[in-house]
Image (tube, coloured by chain):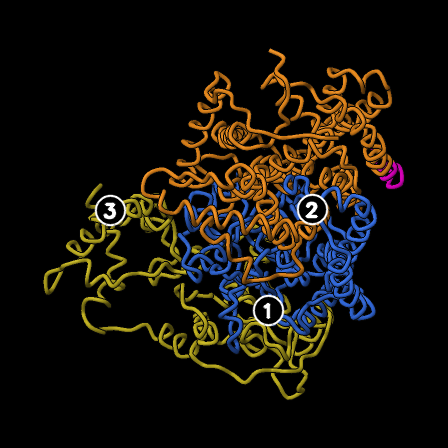
Chain colours: A yellow, B blue, C orange
Amino acid sequence: MMIKKIVCLVGLIPLLAGVCTARAWQATDQERARERAKEVVPFVKEYQDDCQISRRICLMDAGVSLDDVKEVYFLLDSPIIKEREDHYEPVRFAHKRHAALVNDCSKCHHFRPRDENALETTRCSACHQDSFNPDHPERIGLKAAYHQQCMECHQQEAKGPVDCTGCHLKHVPDHKELVKLPDNPDPIQVTKACLECHDTQGEDMLKTAHWLWRGPSPYTTGHRKDILHGKGTTALNNF
Amino acid sequence: MHITRRNFFRFMGAAGASVAVRPPSVHAWQSQAPPDPFGCLVDLTRCVGCRKCEEACAKVNDLPEPERVNCQCTIFEKDRRPDDTSYTVINRYYTGTVDVFDKPVPTYAKVQCMHCQDPACVSACIVGALTKDDTGAVHYDVSKCIGCRYCMVACPFEIPAYEYYDPITPRVMKCTFCQERISKKGGLPGCAGICPTEALTFGRRQTLLGVARKRLKENPGSYIQHIYGEKEVGGTSWMYLSSVPFEEVNLPLLPDTPSPKLSETIQHSLFSYLWSPVLLFGVLGACMARFNRGNDQKQNNADKGGA
Amino acid sequence: MEHKAGPMNRPLWTPGVLVMLVFMFAGALAIIARFTGGIGYVTNLTNARPWGIWVGIDVATGVALAAGGFTTAALAHIFGRHYYEPVTRPALLTAVLGYTFVVLGLLVDIGRSWAIWKPMFHWNLNSVLFEVAMCVMIYLTVLYIEFVPIVAEQFKGRVNLPGLLSKLNNLVDKVLQVADRILGKVMWIFIILGVVLSCMHQSSLGSLMLVAPTKLHPLWYTPLLPLLFLTSAIAVGYPMVVFETTLATASFRLNSEMHILAPLTRITIYLLGIYMLLKLGDMLVRGTWVYLLDGTYQTNAFIVEVLFGVMLPWAMLLCKTIRHSSKGLFTAAALVVGGVVMNRINVFIVGYRSPLSENGYFPAPSEILVTLGLIAALMFIYRVVVTYLPVLQESKEVS
């Protein structure tokens, strides 16, 4: 069992390896999201004050669909917020997944800029920037816009986290300071180091589909239809 | 007892003169609220009870870290009040509303000094240690305080707290509205700056009233149609919007009259330029002169003490 | 009417005095605790209940009961009823001691006792408390000045200080002579000033609660509060004199001074009547009688206060036979005094409602000990003073 646990955590290696073996590999979408998060776009002063239904119709008329979602995920880490405070790690926002689940763009893209040349959908931080702007007192700041939008919907749908650490990562200390690994660690050594502190997470892992899944893995090449594969049954897990 | 008539009339002349030169009338009571104070609008429908404001407040004001900062499980079980270690607290109230899953919906309410427009505490303070300044903050100057706690008696919101366990130099503790921070351009109170949902909106009081009215108008049904603090006790710098009756979240029902109005009116109409004491002195002096005239001679040799 | 006040020349250490000393000692311990552990350590005061018995009894009641000083002074010296002069000295002594202990009580109660001088330099003219403080401060000085002739009368020409201080005998004697001579000429100013100052702060003591309209029970909260405080202070003046003179004469086995006290209380009928009319009229006009039967302890306290502290003694005083029996008179006077004491306690403690928190307050034992200790100390000093200074009327002993 212990060995099974160890091996399963091998999946976490890239994360730690990224730390240990100085930039061996970087996730490109992660980098892109990071770059994008740094951008501050010009403030949209005037907006079209539509009701939600007409907004929805507008978006449908414009033919906005799931295919228009170019970025799969965003990192919500705007300097607009960080200028005032920096208490939490950024939130990873799976834009495409939310779009697919909600299936109503007007829920978040609730207004559009009055400027007719502007795109139908704008990023949050175009309209919501610094809090308590005396020129636009009714406009809430970016931080509040995120929180209100996310939490309200999560509450209404009874889905998704509403607590702080459900979305924000905790401030993770640099593990180079915490863990001492040999120069070229093998997967088992790494997993062992992880489990030294995160033993409960190791236990939890054993109860998830990542560990127990028996059945086809439609997104894994070669395993698409084979019901005998799946993590609960493959030899890899039982190593 | 011995009054020579000359002495008496000399004195009465002076007294009479001082009454006569008293400027014609005592002014009607006027509000001394600053012209364009800052304020804060608390929207209880937005508050999620994260207590980040408590944490930020403690940090900004060098107060001890709030009880159980990172765990909201049991802290709300007791109704808390601001005290000498915390300027603000969040309380949770279940007022009977339920959500679509029949789960009771909590309302969270922040408590802190309301920074009244015409604060009772400022009027009450014997030494003027409490002042309402131009930012709208009710400021406490510990160097003047004598610790009489009359401010605490006067406050209609029961806000000032006292360091009861300090034997020699106790202070009155209450929200400062982060006066130093908001005096600087772009400065925010610790709590308003950190609030994740902008349940706290900071700005000029007048602007906030506009924002509040707009919110009430644009969201019919989501709010009680009342801005708590617009008129209560003559208006407060901190104002509340709520979807549940204000009394149910421990915001007391208060009259629109500023608390200090009556006592200040009485005090000033009776005692400005000390006209009434001087007058009374004159009248009593006249009585004394009249009733003792016959006794002057007899009394001269008699006992002078025993006033 | 010839009269002569004199020292009592009785042994000081009686069993009663020893009991007082015990209370003083206990009170002193509690005060030490207050100045080492803080107010919270010895009292049940909270943020919702900032004023307790130290304000309600030591200060407010102390001021009210010292009213005998200015009311008798007004009667005997200003309105020329010299017949009543024998009672002015004990009343003055009560006032001097009463106000001294008001200040001592304040020193214990305020958090920063060492800062008590600050109101002299930082003025807040809007503050009722500021006016009260100023008046009390000046009035206390006036009272001491008024008391100087009594000291002078006893020691003029026979100053005899012990030990090294005896070198100062001549100087002190000179000072006394000069002070007495000057004061004899200007005493009328201080007498009137005393009355004026008393009227000012007795009424303002009532205005104190006006700043908190939502926190005082409506049975007591009225714009008339200052007037009610003033009239009740004036009304309690003579009954207080009756009360303490009767106690003092009984304690020293002196002739009771019924011939003075009985007519004195006839005036009280009018004074107390005015107070009663104002109080009842105010209740009717504002319609607060609707609370009377709601059974809360505040309401009951109000009923007891008005019924037994105002109406009953007033009715008793109307009756001539009661006025002329020393027991009846004493009872009536005690009831008036009790009524005013209760009124002050009601306004500052019982009727005070904290709008948001739990309302319970009962003084802690150590809190009560401080109050009792101060009262005992006051009585002790009264006894010491009347023993050695010419305050009480000398008369044949009735041993």
**Marks 3 and 2, how far apart in space?**
87 Å
Where residue A5 is drawn, which disc sits there? 3
Q: Secondary structure at mark 3?
A: helix
What chain is tagged by disc 2? Answer: C
Dot 1, crowdedness within 10 Å: few (<14), some or many (≥20)? few
For residue C289: magenta?
yes
Looking at the image, which residue is at 65% across and 58% down? B123
Badges 3 and 1: C-beta atoms under 8 Å apart? Answer: no
Disc 3 versus disc 2: nearer the observer: 2
Relative to B14, residue A67 above or below: below
Residue B94 seen in the figure = no
* Residue linked to disc 2: C198
In front of the other: B215 or C307:
C307
Quadrant of the drawing holding the N terminus of chain C: top right
Q: Secondary structure at mark 1?
A: loop
**Marks 3 and 1, how far apart in space?**
64 Å
Q: Kindly report the secondary structure that dominates the magenta region of the rendered protein.
A: helix
* Residue linked to disc 1: B133
| Residue A35 falls in image quadrant | bottom left
In the rendered structure, which amino acid carries the disc numbered 3?
A: Lys
